[in-house]
Amino acid sequence: MRDIAKTNADRLIAMRDEREQKKDPIDIIEQMRIEAKFLSERSADRKKLADAAEPLYASLNDQQKRRFANELVRLSRGPDGD
């Protein structure tokens, strides 16, 4: 989870820096491509997390599964609730 959060933060910073460096008006098509790349990479990270968590999740009882799910949601929102 920490690695994914760090990677997402790094991606957001890179996107912001790239936007700030451009002097031209925002090209909406390029912006859509950048966002699509970000979402694709984030999707791959989520799949890796799901694959890694699956064996543990399968071993939990129903109450533990609910708590595990709540923790994953809380952690995925980050420190500021996003």
Image: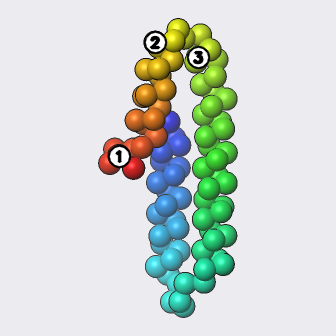
Of circles 3 and 2, the one toward us is 2
Classify residue 77 as left or right of residue 60: left
| Residue 44, percent from left and from top | 67, 45
Q: Looking at the image, tell me whether mark 3 or mark 2 is earlier in sequence order.
A: 3
| Residue 38, percent from left and from top | 61, 59
| Residue 42, percent from left and from top | 60, 50
Classify residue 9 as left or right of residue 49: left
Q: Distance between the residues labelled 3 and 2?
A: 14 Å
**Residue at x-position 63% and y-position 71%:** 32
Which residue is label 2 attached to?
63
Residue lying at the far left of the rendered structure? 80
Q: What element carries label 1?
A: loop
Of circles 1 and 2, the one toward us is 2
Q: Are marks 1 and 2 in contact (CB under 8 Å)?
A: no
Nearer-the-camera pick, 65 or 21: 65
**Residue at x-position 60% and y-position 83%:** 27
Q: Distance between the residues labelled 1 and 2?
A: 24 Å
**Residue at x-position 39% and y-position 44%:** 78
| Residue 13, percent from left and from top | 46, 63
Of circles 3 and 1, the one toward us is 1
- Kind of residue at disc 1: Gly
Which residue is label 3 attached to?
56
- Kind of residue at disc 2: Gln
- Kind of residue at disc 3: Leu
Q: How crowded is mark 1: few (under 14 residues within 10 Å), some or many (20 or more)?
A: few
Q: What element carries label 3?
A: helix
Q: What element carries label 2?
A: helix
| Residue 81 badge | 1
